[in-house]
Amino acid sequence: METEGGGTSLATRLELESYEIGITLGTGSFGRVRIAKEKKTGKYVAVKILKKAEIIKMKQVDHIMNENNILASIDHPFIISMDGFTQDDKHLYLVIEFVRGGEMFTYLRGIGKFDAKQAQFYSSQVASMFEYLHSKNIIYRDLKPENILIDHLGYLKLTDFGFAKIVESRTYTLCGTPEYLAPEMLLNKGHGKPVDWWTFGILLYEMIAGIDPFSDEDPMLIYQKILKGKVKFPRSFDKNAKSLVKHLLQADLAKRYGNLKRGVKDIKGHRFYNGLNWTQLLKKEIDPPYIPPTKGEGDTGCFSPYPDSDSETPAVKESEDPFLEW
């Protein structure tokens, strides 16, 4: 059984006039994310501004509705929180938490790769995110360093729920980033929660090696490598992490960690996490290996600058707007 988005929005309706919209923090397929300041409280937020015409043209209405409703229904220390949303005839505006430390992608590329201790700290938070989402039958399906932000304390926040979906058994939509796609997705066999544990294995490898395991310029060659399933590890790769990655990058779902009888306990109990206190982690009581250099609540210095777009966004006619009933 699958449940789709649509229907009534679960998110709080907000007024766009309540915010001063600032510079762009990032761009995506349907628009951009900007920093904003709530006029009344002075609180900084991020506003995801999505072009309705593009969403409709690309047949992504359900995905966007899913994202909105899922964000409105979750609450976890390592997942972005959402204040609410609003809309006009051109755009949807999702108002989410502003996480000022920037993307993990920028930090990882800057230092090259993480040592085992750092990879343990960051990957354990991702395991915790997935444990929580899966408990609510939500599959995320788009894990990559670009979708993980680092907060001002040095802890992680998962963002961009555009491909997330509530699925109680399996679904068939091909989505995600080529290097991170699970074999069952490529083979269109139907997929569920185990795809997230595959992507978790790819991320852990990338953290420690500095590159993803099936890397190639040509997406078709990436897919071939994924289906072959041969993972080469650099000589310096931590042996406990290597063991965990091998258990995660299993094409056979009956062998993939996270999908066995003990579920996430196989991952959390793996020797790679020896010495980690999971309770302290959730309470953010472990000293992070890196604190982003931010100068205050509205500081955007950890984000790359983006030019503003000149293109005019077309309005959507009321009769053709699937979001109006929201």
Image: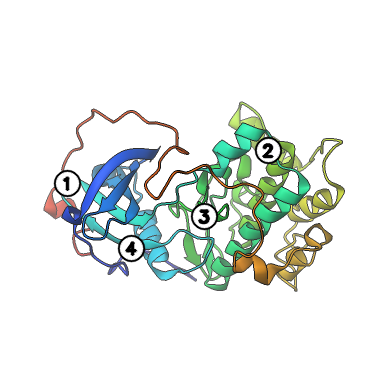
Q: What element carries label 1?
A: loop
Badge 2 vs badge 1, beta-carbon distance below 8 Å: no
* Disc 3 crowd, CA 10 A, few/some/many (<14, 14-19, 20+): many
- Please name the residue that numbered disc 1 is placed on: 316
Q: Of circles 1 and 3, which is in front?
A: 3
Residue located at (38% from left, 67% from top):
72
Give x and y (percent) for residue 167: 51, 67
> How far separated are the C-alphas under marks 3 and 2?
19 Å
- Whether residue 35 sits left or right of residue 239 in the image: it is left
The nearer-to-camera label among 3 and 2 is 3
Residue lying at the far front of the rendered structure: 295
Q: Position of residue 116 (x, y in %)?
A: 77, 48
Q: Could you say which quadrant of the image residue 83 lies in?
A: bottom left
For mark 4, does the 10 Å Cα neighbourhood hold few (<14), some (14 to 19), or many (20 or more) residues? some
Look at the numbered discs 3 and 2 and tell me whether their residues touch, using CB distance below 8 Å.
no
* Precedes in sequence: disc 3 or disc 2: 3
**Residue at x 37% of width, y 31% of height:** 306
